Amino acid sequence: MNEDRDAEQQPGLLSKEALPVFSAFFLWGFGTGALWMARPLLAFDLGGTFFLVGLVSAFSAAPRIVGGPLAGALADRLGRRPIVVAGCVLHGGAAAMQGFTDSYAVFLGLELISGFGVAVWVTGSAALLADFTRVTNRGRGVALRNTSMRLGILAGPAAAGVIATAFDIGAVMVFIGVTKIFIIVITWLLIRETRHAPTPVPEPGERPRRRLRLDVSIFRTRNFLTLSVVTLAIGLVTAGPGAFRTYFPVQAEEVGLSVVEIGTAIGLSGLIAMLISMPVGAVVDWWGRKPVLLLGLVTMAGSMFLLFGMEGLLIALIVAGVFGIGEVVGMNTLQTYAMDLAPEEKRGYFLGTWQGTVNVGQLGGPLLVGAIAAPLGIPAAFGIIGVVLLCAAAFLVVSRTTPSLSQAEGTPAS
């Protein structure tokens, strides 16, 4: 009944109402692409060491672990749009101020605020997209969101380069803040509120109380355990810049590839990801979440093992291409499945908490690979990650409570 009602109320993914939603995702990706180029350069100018550059990335990721659940609970209470706007204000404002500071300590402190803002925006926008879609088209909705953001990420560095050439790196950070202003305008004026208003039922004789309750019972399920295990495994290599993007260039340089060849391989991975995202979304909706997720895990594991034989450009292109396919298949399906499992009235809180497990992988992946690579080498480290991915795939297979959702099925079991 709820699914039929939602199908009547929800617009199509290519409707006029959908255009502002995916335009906002494009603009966020546009700013993110510029940020990925400008932030490490500015951090190095202020800090002077590679360690301090890495510390900035850690400070960006750390607040997201706690920011997601809080933002999600507020999104369920206040609505999606206020949370999306708050995330833009925090992230955009902090980024713009980073462009004016000449102190590394201040830059680092602002990065905490910026990272918290990212968590707020990611959670609010994910809840909005989950509301905007339904089980039968959610895979394509997630794919369209990710494609929009990837287009922005591809265009962002070019814009940042032009601005940095005309002004300086600090001006790029201000530009990132400006992109968030456009998202705020689009969100507030062109996107309707999607939150399903809860219907509280107070006990007889009691006055309704408006407290922000962080209910943990929705996470005490085998479905969420399975989701978390798979998320942590995938997050080790794909979340944020990820362990793969961090160490693949290092290993490629070690085997004799030039900077241009390394850039070509990484660019191929991104191009493949963008091209196959929508077809993958269609397959997720048609075939179901579980089999596609298994395919993504196995494909990513295969790319990890291929690193053992990487000796020239051809193998590097194959490794990057296989990883790009596995990342899109795995991560798109994982995001779709998380939205399926989220209870309607606690969707923001559920997705925010799940996003925290993604960020744990983002923090742990590069550290784990680095720790293993020091004594054993990068290929061995990624080989171990490949084994972890295969173990997660095996866990998914034997997990009987994880449904294979498809168009023919309704809401997931819990």
Image (tube, rainbow, N blue to C red):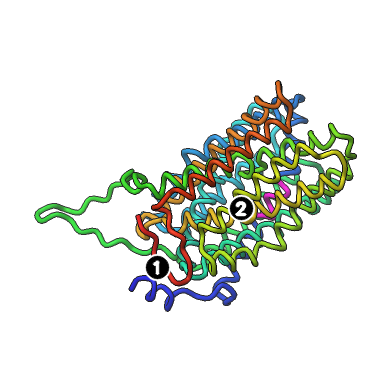
**What is the number of callouts on the image?**
2
Horizontal relation, residue 216 to residue 313: left or right: left
Which is the main secondary structure of the residues drawn in magenta?
A: helix
Residue at mark 1 to residue at mark 2: CA–CA distance? 23 Å
Against 103, residue 290 (above or below) is below
The circle on residue 410 is: 1
Mark toward the start of the polypeptide (1 vs 2):
2
Judging depth in this view, the residue of 297 and 341 nearest the camera is 297
User: What residue is rendered at 81% in x and 44% in y?
Assistant: 316
Q: Residues within 10 Å of mark 2 (few under 14, many from 20)?
A: many
Tell me which residue sits at (45%, 58%) in the image. 80
Residue 386 locus on image (x, y percent): 63, 39
- The question of residue 31 being in magenta is answered with yes
**Element on which disc 1 rests:** loop
Given residues 70 and 318, the one toward you in this image is: 318
For marks 1 and 2, give the one nearer the viewer.
Answer: 2
Q: Position of residue 404 (x, y in %)?
A: 46, 60
- Which residue is tagged 2? 296
- Identify the residue at image location x=54%, y=47%: 393
- Amino acid on which the number 2 mark rests in the picture: Gly
Q: Quadrant of residue 70?
A: top left
Q: Which quarter of the image is occupied by the C terminus?
A: bottom left
Q: Name the residue furthest left.
A: 205
- Percent of width and height locating residue 64: 52, 40
Mark 1 crowd level (few <14, some 14–19, many ≥20, 10 Å Cα): some
Read off the magenta span. 29-35
Specify whether 66 is left or right of 198: right
Residue 109, horizontal then vertical, whole percent: 59, 31
Residue 107 painted magenta: no
| Front residue of this view, candidates 101 and 25 | 25
Under mark 1, the amino acid is: Gly
Helix, strand or loop at disc 2? helix
